[in-house]
Image (cartoon, grey):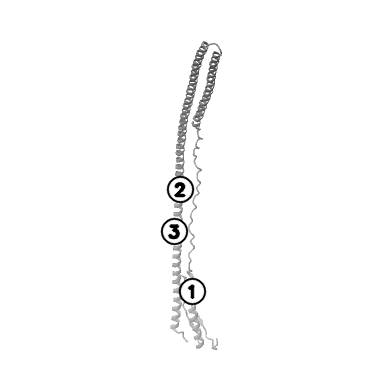
């Protein structure tokens, strides 16, 4: 029984379609792999570029920080030196002013002490003059009393002799004695009072001297020198850590030979199905039928290369069992 040409045609078309589909799938897989590789390479370049830009920026910032630090450090030191000079000048000026005030206080105290001494001397002289005047007055009184005594005694002497004259003389002497005692007591009292007045004058002068010395300023002392500023320790800068490109995983690739193998496998399956169908017809007809099957050779395989499914045979021979048994 002859093989159905339509079936053979469909079998050939199916085999060729499988092989062509495998070739097309392989091409699409290779194209997808190429695009994935390009994308991965582009991402890698972008990551490297970003890392380079970051490192350049970090170095620029690091250099700017160092320059700004040095400028700030010098500015702060110069400012500290200016303040130190200013404070030193102020301290010297204040000391000179205090020294001038102290010198003026010394002069004022000396003048006050001189005034106190002059005032004491004048007060003592006034007290002595008053005491001397009182002594002169008592001397005049004593002289007047003596003259009066002599006059009374003369008068008594002119009286008749007898008890009356004696009594008159005694009375005159007694009166003169009493007056002399009063003058003597008054003189002693005035002398003691004058001495007390002089002592009071001295004590008053002493108190005024103490008050003047207490009002005098304390001698100023020069303050210790203000420490001169020093440059602060220089800061240690650490180089910025280099930024590394981000990890880019390898692209997921597809097998380019897989679709071809699948196409060839499909063609082989179609050929096997056609061969099984031919064997079935030959067994049923009892005649030997030879069916030539021309396998599709893809352009990627050179002529004469062993087919992974069929080898190099170009024909299949089917022999029907004469007994009709399989």
Secondary element type, mark 2: helix
Q: Earlier in the sequence, mark 1 or mark 3?
A: 3
Q: Where is residue 30 shown, x and y percent of the image? A: 45, 67
Mark yes or no: residue 94 visible.
Answer: yes
- Between the residue at mark 3 and the residue at mark 2, the CA separation in whole angstroms equals 28 Å
Give the residue at x 49% y 78%: 269
Which of pointers 1 and 3 indicates the residue nearer the eye? 3
Contact? badges 1 and 3 (CB < 8 Å):
no
Residue 309's disc number: none
Q: Residues within 10 Å of mark 2 (few under 14, many from 20)?
A: few
Disc 3 versus disc 2: nearer the observer:
2
Residue identified by numbered label 1: 262
Question: Does residue 223 lie above or below 260 as drawn?
Answer: above
Rendered view: 15 above or below 205: below
Dot 3 and dot 2 residues touching (CB under 8 Å): no
Q: Earlier in the sequence, mark 1 or mark 2?
A: 2
Residue 182 locus on image (x, y percent): 53, 20
Q: Is residue 298 visible?
A: no
Q: CA distance from mark 1 to mark 2?
A: 65 Å
Which residue lies at the image location 50% right of the left edge and 85% below the top edge? 280
Q: Which of the numbered marks, if any, corresponds to residue 46?
A: 3
Secondary structure beneath dot 1 equals helix
CA gap between label 1 and label 3 equals 38 Å
């Amino acid at each position: 029984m002859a093989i159905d040409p339509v079936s053979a045609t469909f079998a050939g078309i199916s085999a060729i379609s499988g092989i062509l589909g495998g070739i097309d799938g392989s091409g699409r897989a290779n194209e997808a792999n190429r695009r994935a590789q390009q994308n991965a390479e582009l991402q890698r370049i972008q990551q490297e570029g970003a890392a380079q830009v970051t490192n350049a920026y970090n170095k620029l910032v690091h250099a700017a920080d160092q320059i700004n630090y040095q400028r700030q450090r010098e500015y702060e030191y110069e400012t500290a030196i200016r303040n130190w000079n200013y404070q030193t000048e102020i301290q010297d000026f204040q000391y000179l002013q205090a020294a001038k005030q102290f010198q003026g206080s010394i002069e004022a105290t000396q003048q006050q002490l001189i005034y106190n001494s002059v005032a004491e001397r004048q007060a003592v002289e006034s007290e002595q003059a008053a005491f001397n005047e009182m002594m002169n007055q008592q001397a005049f009184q004593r002289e007047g009393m003596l003259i009066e005594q002599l006059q009374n005694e003369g008068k008594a002497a002119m009286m008749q002799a007898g008890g009356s004259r004696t009594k008159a003389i005694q009375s005159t002497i007694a009166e003169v004695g009493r007056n002399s005692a009063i003058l003597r007591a008054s003189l002693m009292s005035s002398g003691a009072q004058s001495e007390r007045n002089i002592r009071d004058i001295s004590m008053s002068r002493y108190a005024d001297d103490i008050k003047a010395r207490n009002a005098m300023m304390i001698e100023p002392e020069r303050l210790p020198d203000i420490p001169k500023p020093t440059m602060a320790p220089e800061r240690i800068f650490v180089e910025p850590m280099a930024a590394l490109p981000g990890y880019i995983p390898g692209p997921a690739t597809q097998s380019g030979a897989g679709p071809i193998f699948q196409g060839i496998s499909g063609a082989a399956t179609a050929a096997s199905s056609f061969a099984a169908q031919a064997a079935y017809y030959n067994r049923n007809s009892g005649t030997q039928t030879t069916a030539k099957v021309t396998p599709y050779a893809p352009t990627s395989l050179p002529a004469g290369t062993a087919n992974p499914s069929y080898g190099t045979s170009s024909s299949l021979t089917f022999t029907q069992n004469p007994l009709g048994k399989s």
